[in-house]
Amino acid sequence: MSVTMPDFDTLVSLHQQDPEALEMFRRHLLREAVDSAPPEQRPALEKLLERIEAARSSAATPIEAAGIAFRMMRDSVNELNATWDHAMQEMAHLQTSLLIERLRR
């Protein structure tokens, strides 16, 4: 069952009036996202969720938690980019090898 995301003003109001309810809603949304993922992706998402929660709990303020989350995302994108670059280099090497082999025939 999918939960509809409230608008920004509603979330701000909830934060001001009942921060614990907002935290419960946040956790519910994350749990729903993991549970609705394809079964083969769930273990990796569970580990990611654990890392996010550990990082959030180490933060002294919400701003620090956001900064930690941003750094985690940036590091992940950098790793993905490096992996992509490596794959492209390997593919170029393979294509070059195949072309040279064809030209030799």
Image (spheres, rainbow, N blue to C red):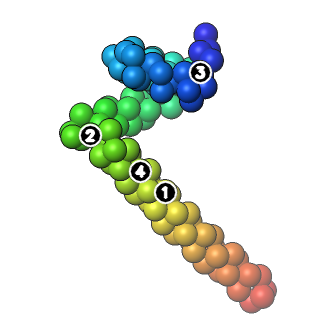
Q: Could you tell which of marks 2 and 4 lies nearer the N-terminus?
A: 2
Q: Are marks 4 and 3 in contact (CB under 8 Å)?
A: no
| Residue corresponding to mark 2 | 61
Q: Could you tell which of marks 1 and 2 lies nearer the N-terminus?
A: 2
Q: Nearer the viewer, mark 4 or mark 1?
A: 4
Residue type at mark 3? Pro
Q: Looking at the rendering, in which quadrant would you find the C terminus?
A: bottom right
Residue type at mark 1? Val
* Snapshot quadrant of residue 89: bottom right
Give the residue at x 37% y 15%: 18
Looking at the image, which residue sits at the far top?
Answer: 1
Residue type at mark 2? Thr
Q: Which mark is residue 70?
A: 4
| Residue corresponding to mark 3 | 6
Q: Nearer the viewer, mark 1 or mark 2?
A: 2
* Snapshot quadrant of residue 25: top left
Helix, strand or loop at mark 4: helix
Residue 69 screen position, x and y as percent: 38, 45
Helix, strand or loop at mark 1: helix
* 35 shown above or below 70: above
Q: Could you tell which of marks 3 and 2 lies nearer the N-terminus?
A: 3
Q: Could you tell which of marks 4 and 3 lies nearer the N-terminus?
A: 3
| Residue corresponding to mark 1 | 77
Looking at the image, which residue sits at the far bottom?
Answer: 104
Helix, strand or loop at mark 3: loop
